[in-house]
Amino acid sequence: MTLIKTSLLNGIAVATKVACALVLNKILALYVGPSGYAVIGQFQNAVAIAGNLVGNALSPGVTKATAEHFDAPARQHAVWQTALRLSLVACLLVALPILAGGADLVRWLLHRDDLSTIYLWIAASLPALALNNLLLAIANGKKEVRTYVGANIATSLVSLLVTGGLTHVFGLYGTLAASSIGAVLSLGVTAWLITRHGWFRFAHLWGRLDRGAGRELTGFALMGLTSAVALPMSQILIRDILVSHTGLATAGLWQASTKISELYLMLITTTLAVYYLPRIAEIRTGAELRREVFKVYRLVLPVTIAGALVIFLLRDFIVQVLFAADFAPMRALFPWQLTGDVIKIGSWVLGYIMLGRAMVRVFILTEILFSASLVTLSWCLVRQYGVIGAPMGYALNYALYWIAMALFVRKEISRLPPEQREAT
């Protein structure tokens, strides 16, 4: 599957997801307002951390190993079985502390007493999150793009129906509970799609823990666990900084601006995950890696810049149509937020190489360092400039990250054998 074909197929899923998200976004803006939007952002980051800890952390490793062992089904099955067992153990380890202290954690995280029981929904959804992540990683590694796209389209539709319905009936509490219910329904759709392929049986997921596969997944697990905590936690801390210095409603404006970025960048980020990560895992020479990087840059940077310009020019219309009148002040955040988006995508094209090439130490070091840098820069700039300091810190942090990635990738290319050696 080529980059262009993958992008076109993935574009269908992205278009569906964006359409559903826009409708849902309007529902949430009307029902919960800026303050509720900030609460939803905190909750989504907490769910992301839990989801990463119980299986999503292993997804890049499962994708890479599945793609790498394309000619060895038995080896693929050993990887899947090991990943499932590790995910189930992780579910237990994560669920226990959530059940023990979830109420206090929710009060601290969401700044609301009336939502203290929402932790029960998180704990209940962990197995579904883990298994769904594993199945999607397998489909991605097998390069079954249609299955991957179909599962994502179904997830978008389920999210719209469940979240919209529960928000209408139960308000903010329904919005938060919907993520757990949606996870179970999404798993059912993904399982149905993947079992249609002759190469997959659920029996392939159950078996002994394979030490070789465990070692193969360990590096990715460490990288995934770092991401599981570093990025969502940095967003939680930034939101807390905004709440402390500017108020909960203002933090909701920042959350809304980051949501817009998430929506229009979705085509790029999902294409990188679906096409680029397995492709990087296959590359064996420095010349081939360099060509792949420039090929991806030629597509994603112009698309990202064009998207950012369109969003900037239509910012007033977007705020009016997608949100509500009390979100109007967020238009001031667009210049820095959109600049940061372009810089982030530029840096991620290089950053994905660390995942594809299993550069464990570099990945963990840079994730921790630049997550801490993001929080620190945001804290300093929010104190100086108010809420606009958050997107300013975002843009500056990813500029520094891009420079660091360029240095590391240049070293990795020089370490690989040149193309002419491959033929000897």
Image (cartoon, rainbow, N blue to C red):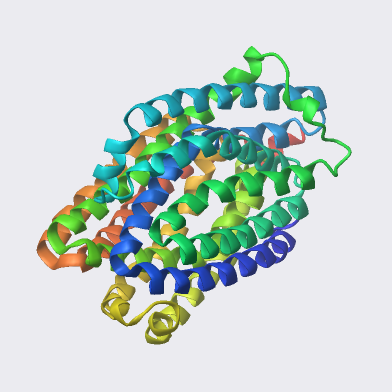
User: Which residue appears at 44% of the width and 74% of the height?
Assistant: 308
Q: Which residue lies furthest to the right in this view?
A: 198
Which corner quadrant holds the C terminus? Answer: top right
Q: In this view, does 114 lie above or below 137?
A: below
The residue at the point 77 percent across, 36 percent down is 423
Front in this rendered view, residue 411 or 121: 121
Q: Where is residue 228 in the image (x, y as percent from the top left)?
A: 43, 38
Image location of residue 34, percent across then percent down = 30, 68
- Give the number of marks: 0
| Relative side of 153 to 260, left or right | right
The residue at 44%/53% (across/down) is 176
- Between 267 and 416, the one lying in front of the other is 267
Where residue 83 appears, as percent x and y from the top left, is 62, 26
Q: Name the image quarter holding residue 257.
A: bottom left
In-image side of 388 versus 102 (left or right): left
Can residue 255 be seen from the camera position used here? yes
Q: How far from the left and from the top, in percent, is residue 312?
A: 40, 80
Query: Which of these two is toward me, 147 or 274?
Result: 147
Q: In which quarter of the image is the N terminus?
A: bottom right
Q: Observer-nearest residue: 21 or 316?
A: 21
Which residue lies most toward the front here? 169
Q: In this view, does 259 lie to the left or right of 24?
A: left
- Asked whether the viewer can see residue 302, the reply is no
For the point 27% across and 36% down, the residue is 104
